[in-house]
Amino acid sequence: MQDNFLKTLTLFLSAFTGLTLLILFITIYFFKKRKTLKQDEDIKEHSEVGFVVDTFHELVGKLKEKENELQRLKAFAEDKAVSIEAYNENILQSVPSGVISIDNEMKIKSINQSAERILGISARDVLGRRCIEVFSEPLVTLMKEGRTVSRDEYPYITGDKRHIWLGITASELKNIAGDKIGGIFVFTDLTDIKTLQAQVELKERLSQLGEMSAGISHELRNSMAVISGYAKLLGKKTEPANIPTVNAITEEIKSMDRIISELLAFAKPTVLSREEVDLNELMKETAANVLAGNDAVRVSVNSEGPLSIKADVVLLRQALSNLFINAVEAMPEGGSIDAGLRLIQNKIEIRIKDSGCGIPEEIRRKIFLPFYTTKQKGFGLGLALVQKIIVSHGGAIEVESKEGDGTTFAIVLPETK
């Protein structure tokens, strides 16, 4: 029985030991299997992460390349834009015509060098300012109205007080979408052209006047000679009481002869005998001669510096004398004359301003016409002769006057060396 128990116990222990070993083996197997699976998963996971990381780095590299390329293209585009802008600016600054652009708020956005020179202003002083603060008429009105203008001609007073003529073209300034963003004004200085036109017109008028006056003077002088002869005969035979009447006829004949002589001299082409003339001394000398003994009129001659010109000194003195005489006659009760000289853009400007009664507008338009006068004495050739002398020197003369506010004669002569 004990043997049976021992056998049974031995069998149980054997079975238990076998079972324990089996369980242990199975446990070890599954543990190893699990470890193996885990390693496979780790490897797989590691492989997937590596792929993602490698792909990410590859994309980052490509993006970096694209970024570098975009930076390069951006830098190229910026350089090209700067180059185009500089090129356009060079074109704008090289254009001989003046160009000004304004925005919708009437502020000056751009102005080229030609505009600075023509208008006598500086870009650094006017950019960003409103046009009404910088320009005078008619530019201000044209800019306010915003209308299109094609090559219209206008007189204009520049920033440095020059009187010029402008040929202006104005139009709207639009962007690519067609929206109005301001206005643009292109203009040229027509002053020299106007001066040449005045010279040609004056020469044509003088030529026509010369031809006409030569024929008329010949016929008039024949009749005047006959009248003068009869007057002399009448003076010998008339009674003493009638002698003053005969003498009056003779004097009128002489007066008519002087008028004809002046007309012929005026219509005759001017031949200049040019020499170096110191304008400062000529102005002072002429003013002193005209105003000698006249204490009621004060005169001042101002100059920005020594100015000389090659001109006919006799004719130029005659022209200046006539202007000073007119100024004195416009101030019968006394006043002042301000004479100024200055050099502007290779041209010499002479201004003679009086404080007299001024000239009405309807008369001002006619003062340079031959034989037009408002004086009781005189032939009306004074200012016409002044204009002829100035024009024959290649210059121009203008008058500024307002009734009751004095008169200014402005002469512009080309600088000669």
Image: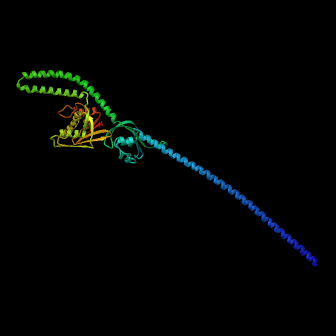
Image coordinates for residue 106, horizontal then vertical, percent? 40, 46
Residue at left 28%, top 41%? 342
Residue at x-position 18% and y-position 21%: 222
> How is the protein colored in the picture?
rainbow
Give the residue drawn at x 46%, y 41%: 87
Would residue 239 be found to the left or right of residue 5 on screen? left
Query: Which residue lies most toward the bottom here?
Result: 2
Instruction: Evaluate whether residue 407 shows in this view.
Output: no
Closest to the observer, 185 or 84: 84
Q: Is residue 195 visible?
A: yes
**Left or right of residue 151: residue 81:** right
Tell me if residue 333 comes above or below residue 208 in the rendering: below
For the C terminus, the quadrant is top left
Question: For residue 116, which quarter of the picture?
Answer: top left
In the image, what residue occupies the spot 18% across and 32% down? 378
Quadrant that contains the N terminus: bottom right
The percent position of residue 371, horizontal first and vertical second, equals 22, 30
Within the image, what quadrant is residue 361 found in? top left
Query: Quick check: 154 left or right of 388?
Result: right
Q: Compare residues 155 and 402 and report the one nearer the observer.
A: 155
Q: How far across and down, in percent of the image, does residue 215 sit?
A: 23, 22
Q: Give coordinates of residue 181: x percent, y percent.
A: 44, 44
Side of 53 where 346 appears, left or right: left
* Extreme residue toward the left, this view: 240
